[in-house]
Image (cartoon, grey):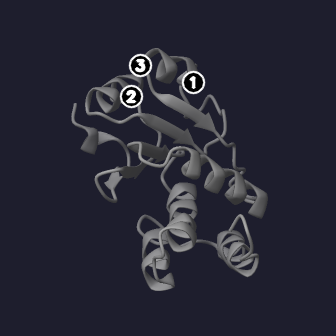
Amino acid sequence: MPLDDIKNFLVLDERIATAGQPSEEQLRELAAAGYEAVVNLGLLDPRYCLPDEAGLARSLGLDYTHIPVPFDAPAVDDFRAFRATMDRLAGKRVLVHCAANFRVTSFVALWGEAAQGWPTERADALARTFWEPNETWQRFLADCRASRQPGF
């Protein structure tokens, strides 16, 4: 099963990929493909998450970070935690995922803009790759951009 079979899998560059929830087999394939870390922004909801993603990831030698972001209430502090995680993982191949790659594209868009120097247009295009951010997420993007200070 190729990595492309992961829901909404998107390779941004040789280091960063984003996706919806991978299966246990897809996490194994991810490790075999040379990824070194997984960042999960989804909630631990048994309707779509793995029973023990953290344990499986670590057993495969993957650095695992879980930042649970409520879909209906993303916060600037969630983004700051994400930014710190991405800074810590600099130089590693990373998969960032959530349930459907909606949260993730918004977070990675903001990270690209803040840490990688992407123009806002590129960041916004990424945020809209799989969906049109609703009012809550548009406000989240605006709030994070308005908070441009150390940590953004």
Return the disc, 3 or 1, that comes first in the chain's sequence: 1
Q: Is residue 144 left or right of residue 34?
A: right
72 shown above or below 89? below
- Secondary structure beneath dot 3 equals loop
Looking at the rendered structure, the kind of residue marked 3 is Leu
**Horizontal placement of 13 versus 45: left or right?**
left
Q: Are marks 3 and 2 in contact (CB under 8 Å)?
A: yes
Residue drawn 52% across the image and 58% down it: 102
Quarter occupied by residue 68? top right
Q: Which residue appears farthest toward the left when viewing the image?
A: 2
Image position, residue 60 (x, y; %): 41, 19
Which residue matches tag 3?
Answer: 60
Q: CA distance from mark 1 to mark 2?
A: 11 Å
**Alpha carbons under labels 3 and 1: distance apart:** 10 Å
Helix, strand or loop under label 2:
helix
List x then y, in percent, for residue 2: 22, 36
Residue at horizontal 33%, vertical 32%? 30
Give the label, 3 or 2, closer to the camera.
3
Tell me the quarter of the picture where residue 139 sits: bottom right
Label count reads 3
Q: Amino acid at mark 1?
A: Ala
Residue 78, placed above or below residue 22: below
Q: Quadrant of residue 152?
A: bottom right
The residue tagged 2 is: 27
Q: Residue at x 66, y 69 (%)?
A: 137
User: What residue would you read off at disc 1?
Assistant: 54
Is the residue under label 1 in contact with that under label 3 (CB below 8 Å)?
no
**Lower position in the chain sequence, tag 1 or tag 2:** 2
Identity of the residue furthest to the top in this view: 59
